Amino acid sequence: MEFNQDNRSFCTTVAVLDTVAEQLADVDLTLPDYCPDIEKILKCTLIPKIQTRTLSGGQLQIDGNCVVNVLYVDSIKKSIRCCEQSVNFSQSFSVKEAPDNPVILTRTKPEYINCRALSPRRLVMHGAFSLYAKVLSSAKTSIYSPPAENCLEAQLMNIKCASLTSLCQEQFSVVEEVSVGDKPVIESILSTDISVNITDTKAVTGKLMANGEINLKLLYITDVESGETGKLDYLLPFNQIIDCEGIDENTINCVSCDIMSYDIRLKNDV
């Protein structure tokens, strides 16, 4: 007796790589001439930033830099100062099954940072951070579908499942000139915090329109002579159109956005 099984298939995501690696950061920092001597170290932070991600020949290559930031009290005016230095890092991962159109997800997590002053102008720092890497691909999965004729008794259960229509990713840059408005001017930046959030998405045939906002928070020195500080909390809206083949107005879209790296520079008004 022959029994013909009729299977239906739907598309889903599979992780062809899901791993983590520890990266070390060793920094020997000497204060520049314009910075006063260190009297007391207040805080030392480690900020990893990913610059590029490339998948080629079964190897995922991730390059970036790690910024070490030190807040301290200077020995002259007893005010808060900041100095920083960056070191580059590079890490590669083997991907056994490299997909044609992969989605690469990466993130970093600072683990620890130790700071020791060898002299009032020289610091030695040792830290580490975790580098997480995941590569997603699409794959088809078969599910049993009962035949039209009742030739086999089966226990059935109805469940809802979504079939993956498209898997896409796009990297883009956001550049903005930020003004403090009526607040005191920025003499020197002490610390920064930045986050991103998707506020709205809309799909049309083959295109995905994403709206979001970047939240930038700054702690800065308003007067180098007195050491007075100020804060800035700024929301930067953005929108991006992403090519995504297979989607339309009826698809359910799952969208996420991450900040790979950022750079904040002071602009002198002339």
Image (cartoon, grey):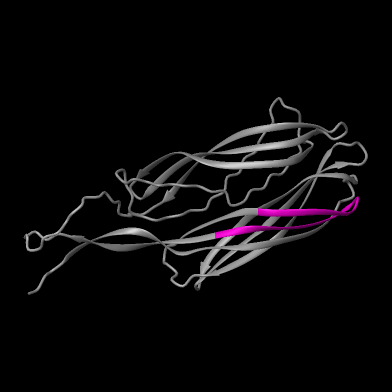
Quarter assignment of residue 10: bottom left
- Residue 43, compared with residue 88, is above or below; it is above
Across the whole image, how many numbered discs are drawn on residues? 0
Answer whether residue 117 is magenta in the image: yes
**Which residue is found at the position 71% from the left and 44% from the top?**
265
Q: At 73% across and 54% down in the image, what residue appears?
A: 113
Residue at point 18% right, 54% down?
156
Q: Position of residue 221 (x, y in %)?
A: 79, 35
In this image, 147 relative to 245: left or right?
Answer: left
Measuring from the top left, give residue 194's x and y in whole percent. Answer: 62, 42
Vertical placement of 10 versus 57: above or below? above
Name the quadrant containing residue 116: bottom right
| Whether residue 186 is situated above or below residue 251 in the rendered picture | above
Q: Tell which residue pokes out farthest to the top in this image.
A: 182
Q: Residue furthest right?
A: 76
User: 34 or 48: which is nearer to us?
Assistant: 48
Residue 219, image quadrant: top right
Identify which residue, 151 or 6, lies in the foreground: 151
Which secondary structure is most common in the magenta stretch? strand
Would residue 121 be found to the left or right of residue 173 on screen?
right
Asked whether residue 229 is drawn in magenta, I would say no
Residue stretch rendered in magenta on the structure: 111-132
Q: Quadrant of the N terminus?
A: bottom left
Measured as percent of width and height from the top left, residue 86 is found at: 73, 56
Quarter of the image containing the C terminus?
top right
The x and y percentages for residue 199 are 47, 37
Q: Which residue is at a point 44% across and 49% down the rendered structure image?
A: 242
Left or right: residue 218 compared with residue 53: right
